[in-house]
Image (cartoon, coloured by chain):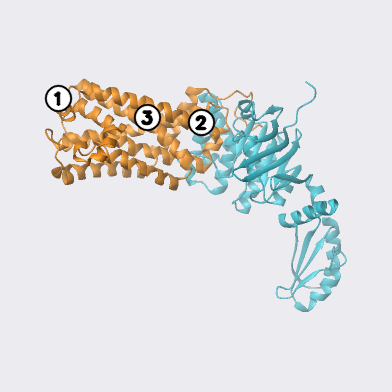
Amino acid sequence: MTGTPPTIEATGVVKVFGKTRALNGLSLTVAPGQVLALLGPNGAGKTTFVNLVATLTRPDAGTLRVHGRDVARHPAEVRSLIGLAGQSAAVEPKLTGRENVEMIARLFGRSHDEARSGAGRLLDRLALGDAADRKVETYSGGMRRRLDLGASLVGQPRLLLLDEPTTGLDPRSRLELWDVIRSLVADGTDVLLTTQYLDEADHLASHVAIIDHGRVVAAGTPRELKRRAGRSMVEVHVREAAELDRVATLLTAIGDGNPNVDEPTRTVRVGVRADTDRIFAALRPLDEAGIAIDEVAVRQPTLDEVFLALTGTAQENVA
Amino acid sequence: MSLAIAQPRGNGAGLLTSTTQIARRVLLRFIRSPQLVVVGTMQGAMFLLIFRYVFGGAISTGGIDYVDFVVPGFITTGVLFNAMYSSVGTAEDLQSGLVARLRSLPIPRSAVLLGRALADTAIQMWGLLFTIGLGFLVGFRLHGSVESALAAFGLVVLFGFVFEWLFILVGMIAGSVQAVQGFALVIFPLTFVSSAYVPVLSMPTWLQGFAENQPMTVMVNAVRTLTEGGHAEALLGHPAAYFVARSLIWSIGLIAVFAPLAVWKYRRG
């Protein structure tokens, strides 16, 4: 053996459905130990790529290897390396949580006793121990997703595939699921996840690939991409409309471009390229000037804004 | 602490374990959905009572009582109506993502379909036994040997298993429960344009060609001649062996076509 093969190695992968080129020459590499987030809007090809890695469909062109195994030529070997949690919670609502996990464990070739004891430990770890013997149809959306994630872990996958793991979850369930995923990553599981949310990629992934129209348009660490995508947005909501102009003047110091004043909502918005420390420093003068502020929000650029920034940059480079 | 259930990775379960686990899940799902059990059973019972007491008096079967004529028809066509639930179940599994999960596991891919086909055949037997019981209650009587009646029962179970593959394929092609209902219309010509409820000779000539030669008629007549003996054989113009042989040929042919198609469709996704 000369070195460890990449966890995922995709070269010029094409997948066509009818007239749609869902993947149009996608190339990317995931090194062992990385957690890669595929970030993109609906229809970008994220799920198609996950389905190819999961051997549910085959590429029409290009090569795709998982731990060195070609997905088209050795799908059975790839299947024993991966765990898949899809967009919907693929668990049986008429079975209990325990029965669901035990069934998957038995399908992974575990004995009845192994499946039984293992399922108990797994459900406890996912904080589903109390609900283990209730039918899944009584679970909340967040519990179902956790159980689905659990089912994908039963075979101790070397690569976990999570397709939009938190879509449709309330904020608290989302945070809980993030915690579980992070503890898996800490245990050394490689993860490929898809998401529409930059903050999710930021929280979970060591690397991000932004895809659009079936190709990778930008890739790097979340930090690199945010630097390239630029601006976070600072929003200051003042109590008195009369203060708006003063606030706008003070915020010009940290702003990348001129602040935008929105009188009806008494809000000043400004894009910033700075890190969080500098933002706090810049807000201090507002406090010192004694301006009554109802709310300050710093938000990351939305996916739209990142897209605009990154694809815009690419076009400028070409020109 | 690791989350995994067992440390060393195996290569997944074999055909037998996989099939059993899949079948078990389908059975538990059915048993735990009481509305499915009740509605399915009631519907079959109501149709049987309507034909027995409402239409029966107006249908001339020449030689044998209408109840003896129609109950074998009901029992046999019942497998088609019940097999339709396999399309619904398959489409539901596709929609819920369960099929994707199962296809990503290192198990034999035919196990998922075989498990469903076997479990749904077992579920069909529930409806079958209920219809037989109700049939006896409303006046149906055996006029052949017990061995022949048992053979007829075995044949109906076999027919049920045969049609499972067609309806699993339909479920996979349809992809959604709503679409299944459209495909399910195929059941009506197969059941009503057959010898199940009325003698084929009472139909217009242009329909008789289809009715006489389609598999449902052959299967119904096999069950009818086995349970009703000489009267039915005289009425239908052939001995039981004639219909049984043809129904077995149809069964082999239907499985040979639809089982590989269903597995192919499942593999392809």
- Quadrant occupied by the N terminus of chain A: top right
Amino acid carrying mark 3 in the image: Val
Going from N to C along the chain, the mark reached first, 1 or 3, is 3
Image colour for chain B is orange
Image location (x, y in percent) of residue B241: 24, 21
| Mark 1 residue element | helix
On the picture, is B161 further left or further right than A152?
left
Q: Is residue A184 visible?
A: yes
Image colour for chain A is cyan
- How many angstroms separate mark 1 from mark 3 (CA)? 28 Å
Mark identifier at residue B162: 3
- How many angstroms separate mark 1 from mark 2 (CA)? 44 Å
For label 1, the residue is B230
For image coordinates 65% across by 30% down, the residue present is: A71
Chain identity of mark 1: B
Q: Is residue A134 visible?
A: no
**Badge 1 vs badge 2, beta-carbon distance below 8 Å:** no
Amino acid carrying mark 1 in the image: Gly
Tell me, yes or no, whether dots 3 and 2 are on the same chain.
yes
Q: Residues within 10 Å of mark 1 (few under 14, many from 20)?
A: some
